[in-house]
Amino acid sequence: MNVWSAVVGGLAGTLVLTTVLRASTELRLTRIDLPFLLGTALTSSRRRAKAIGYVAHFSFGILFALGYFVLFVTLQASGPVLGAALGVAQAAFAGTALVNVLLPIVHPRMGSGFSSSKERTLLEEPGFMMRNYGRATPLVGLVVHVLYGAIVGTFVQYGSR
């Protein structure tokens, strides 16, 4: 297995994930905007938040792909099916613990059950499985993470030939 195939797969997977999320937003299936969510953690400027958020989003895409790679090496197996299964696990973690519990605690511009009306927030708390961003958001989140995992798994599998 080749680590560079995981990096390229992470970039490709993140590109597909981001594109499908953007399309889902335009089709009004969800209101989630992950680059904006990440960017506003680092700046209060809405315009700069998008650019910073895209850099952070693609960086995390590479980091998660490297995590997938470690699991592939440990299991001595890779491929789209195993990658998709890891994508399901990642979607479950992201929708429950990551954005529902951890992100509102550390994000300086996200509202939470602990925010007062005197505090200025830019973002609504995502809620369990990000449902505060639309009823279809959990399904959209699952689909994009399964696609991401399948893409990373495919790149790693074919990069080892």
Image: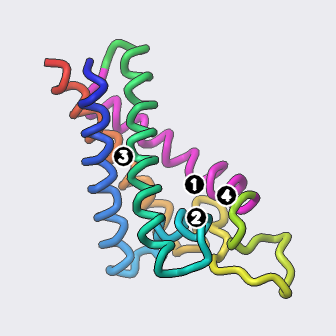
Mark 4 and mark 2: span between their CA atoms?
A: 11 Å
Q: Is residue 81 magenta?
A: yes
**Numbered disc 4: secondary structure:** helix
Q: Which residue is mark 2?
A: 130
Please state which of the two labelled residues, at mark 3 or mark 4, is closer to the viewer: 4
How many residues crowd mark 1 within 10 Å: few (<14), some (14–19), many (20+)? many
Q: Quadrant of the C terminus?
A: top left
Is 138 in front, or is 103? 103
Whether 39 is drawn above or below 142: the answer is below
- Tell me if 153 is positioned left or right of 122 in this view: left
Tell me if label 1 and label 2 are in contact, CB under 8 Å: yes
| Stretch of the chain drawn in magenta | 78-105
Whether 8 is drawn above or below 43: the answer is above
Q: Amino acid at mark 1?
A: Gly
The residue sitting at 50% across, 39% down in the picture is 89
Mark 3 and mark 4: span between their CA atoms?
A: 22 Å
Q: Amino acid at mark 2?
A: Met
